Image: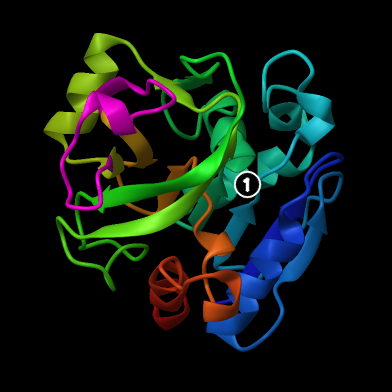
Amino acid sequence: MKAGIVIFPGINRERDMVIALEASFGVKPKMVWHKDTDVSGLDLIVIPGGFSFGDYLRCGAMAAQSPIMHAVKAHADRGGYILGVCNGFQILTEAGILPGALLRNASLRFLSMDCHLRVERADTVFTRQYQTGQTFRSVMAHGDGNYFADTATLDRLEGNNLVALRYATKAGDITPEVNLNGSAHSIAGILSPNLRVLGLMPHPEDLVDPMMGGADGKPLFDALAAA
């Protein structure tokens, strides 16, 4: 699988994503500037975290209007794989590729800490090296990670099993105490109906090597590399 990383002004997690992808894929991903529109030859498009365009207006709103997003949407329509992490998740919702929105954290504070994610389904290209119900450690670093959607959308996500990851205790329990940003249904990540687009708020790329303090996130990138 050939991967590319989209770069917007203000994005600051692209180097972390390069490390994660290169460790699993064995080659460096292509870096694609947001004004470019050529994503030909790419199987996986990654939109990393950061503060695209300084988070003016709403997080991801300006990036969603960049020229590259027409190509990203076309890639999604063709059934291509897309991974959006943190600001990348926000951009995917603003672009209408994934439903819902990311609001200010319930605490109105920026959250920077470890969390645990429970895998809700392990039959996708992103999660198949985990097990359903398994938890793994990840890193939260966001001020607008409070996932929101209307009741009909939440019902559709739940009914179609499109919630990929939830905030949980290390033991896998879903409790209000660990849902620190206040996300509806403790949602940390969701999938597109064809299971080829994943958006999530925490950063799996921050834990892909023991030298980083752990490798809990590496199975996600290993699974993509093996696709």
The image shows residue 44 at horizontal and vertical percentages of 55, 64
- Outermost residue, bottom side: 26
The image shows residue 179 at horizontal and vertical percentages of 33, 29
Please give the range of residues in magenta: 168-185
Does the rendering let one see residue 39? no
Where is 153 relative to 142, above or below?
Answer: above
The image shows residue 172 at horizontal and vertical percentages of 17, 49
User: In which image quadrant can residue 52 be found?
Assistant: top right
Residue at 57% across / 31% down in the picture? 90
In this picture the colour scheme is rainbow
Where is 75 relative to 52, above or below?
Answer: below
User: Residue at label 1?
Assistant: 72
Does the rendering let one see residue 163? yes
Instruction: Bin the neighbour count of mark 1 within 10 Å (Cα to Cα): few under 14, some 14-19, many 20 and up.
Output: many
The image shows residue 125 at horizontal and vertical percentages of 34, 66
Residue 175 magenta: yes
Where is 84 relative to 44, above or below?
Answer: above
Q: Report the front residue among 211 and 120.
A: 211
Residue at 83% across / 27% down in the picture? 54
Q: Amino acid at mark 1?
A: Val
Residue 155 magenta: no
Q: Report the front residue among 12 and 137.
A: 137
Relative to 59, is 160 on the left or the right? left
Q: Report the front residue among 121 and 109.
A: 109
Residue at 20% across / 49% down in the picture? 120
Which secondary structure lies at badge 1?
helix
Relative to 14, is 17 on the left or the right? left
Q: Which quarter of the figure is the C terminus placed in? A: bottom left
Relative to 66, is 195 on the left or the right? left
Where is 189 relative to 45, above or below?
Answer: above
